[in-house]
Image (cartoon, rainbow, N blue to C red):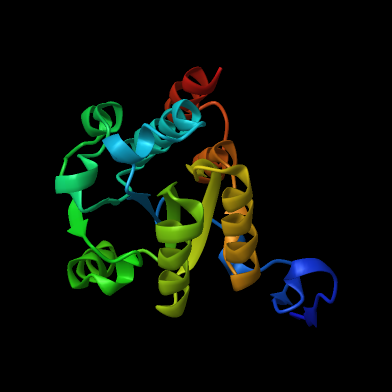
Amino acid sequence: MIFETQIYSGNLSHIHIKGGATEKFFLDKDSAALLIIDIQEKLTAVMKTKEEIIKNCIHLIELSKTYNLPIILTEQYPKGLGQTVEEIRVSLPYYIPIEKFTFNCCDEPSFLNEITAANRRNIVVTGMEAHVCVLQTCLGLLQEGHNVHVVKDAVCARSKDNWETGIEFMRDAGAVITSTETVLFQVLRIAGTEEFRAISRRIK
């Protein structure tokens, strides 16, 4: 028998629980896609946490390559803000960015086409800035019916206050706030495999 209850504490008050867990919190290799939003040369140059963001994003790219997760890459006005940073470009299995002017990636038709083609319910979100393009895209994806996992140590803003505002806003809107290692080990699922050993070596 499956019991349905509702949590009334904290920010999960709107979530219905079945069988003690809820589907949106689960990630696996068959349901997830990676989204990298606007980690571009001129934007990255003014981010205080850029090294950590790039490192964690590359960890997630390597996970995606290991399990053939779709990777969707966007660039905001690359003529003015530059390309995706080189460290990420060379890590990607292919470099085909979606160029945009809109802050919400979902307002760019070619982006929604890529999301539809990926056919993945769970979107793992990285990028910048947390309170602008990442936030607005998160809201757009939620509106489209996707589960959104925002990787807080692979998302940044120019100020800590704006980063915190973006993260809190997205959590309140219904996104799952997660971390790089949480995503890695959710997708890996078990220890002792070649995939586990390869990812473990990366994060030591």
Q: Position of residue 14 (x, y in %)?
A: 71, 79
Quarter that holds the N terminus: bottom right
Regarding residue 18, the answer to whether it shows in the image is yes
Say which of 149 and 171 sits in front.
171
Q: Is residue 87 left or right of residue 136?
A: left
Say which of 20 and 153 sits in front.
153
Residue 166's image quarter?
bottom right
Regarding residue 28, the answer to whether it shows in the image is no
**Residue in view at x 19 percent, y 46 percent:** 80
Q: Position of residue 48 (x, y in %)?
A: 51, 31
Q: Taking 154 as reference, is 105 above or below it?
A: below
Q: Is residue 192 left or right of residue 101?
A: right
Quarter that holds the C terminus: top right
Say which of 58 and 186 sits in front.
58
Q: Taking 146 as reference, is 59 above or below it?
A: above
**Residue in view at x 60 percent, y 70 percent:** 174
Q: Taking 28 as reference, is 197 above or below it?
A: above
Residue 51's image quarter?
top left
Marker count (numbered): 0
**Residue in view at x 62 percent, y 57 percent:** 165
Q: Is residue 4 left or right of residue 200?
A: right
Say which of 141 and 159 sits in front.
159
**Residue in view at x 47 percent, y 73 percent:** 142
Residue 61's image quarter?
top left
Q: Position of residue 128 (x, y in %)?
A: 42, 48
Q: Position of residue 125 (x, y in %)?
A: 44, 53
Q: Is residue 140 left or right of residue 26?
A: left
